[in-house]
Amino acid sequence: MVDVGTLFRRLTLQVIAEAALSMTPEESDDVLPRLYEPLVAEANRRVWLPARAHLPIPARFQYDRRCGS
């Protein structure tokens, strides 16, 4: 089974990285998913549990650290 959502997400990141940062697709695949995917996953969790943004849990501290808060 192929996860089309993941493939399109990677393609979108590659296009943005090439246009805005002059990165090759390989560089983009190496760097951006490590930065982008954890932030998006936490943001999606906060949609379903808004209090998560205020709870003192490790995920919140990781999210804040990655966002530079």
Image (cartoon, helix red, strand yellow):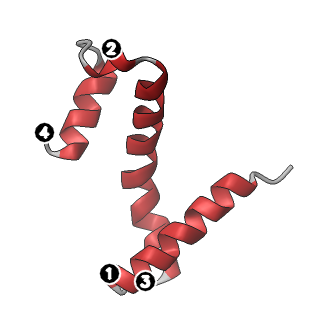
Say above or below: 58 vs 32.
above
Q: Tell me the amino acid under the disc marked 4.
A: Ser
Task: Please report whichever mark, 3 or 4, sits nearer to the chain's N-terminal start.
Answer: 3
The three-letter amino acid code for the residue at tag 2 is Ala
Q: Which mark is residue 18?
A: 3
Binning the other alpha carbons within 10 Å of mark 4 as few (below 14), some (14 to 19) or many (20 upward) gives few
Residue at which label 1 appears: 21
Tag 2 residue:
51
Q: Amino acid at mark 1?
A: Leu
Using the image, tell me which numbered label, if any, was put on residue 33. none
Q: What is the distance, in whole Å, between disc 2 and disc 1 at their CAs?
A: 35 Å
Q: Is residue 31 left or right of residue 13?
A: left
Q: Are marks 3 and 1 in contact (CB under 8 Å)?
A: yes
Which of the marked residues, 1 or 4, is nearer the chain's N terminus? 1
Q: Amino acid at mark 3?
A: Glu
Disc on res. 69:
4
The answer to whether the residue labelled 3 contacts the one labelled 4, judged by CB atoms less than 8 Å apart, is no
Q: Secondary structure at mark 1?
A: helix
From mark 3 to mark 4, how far is it between C-alphas?
27 Å
Q: Residue at x 45, y 72 (%)?
A: 28
**Depth check: 26 or 49 in front?**
49
Mark 2 vs 1, N-terminal side: 1
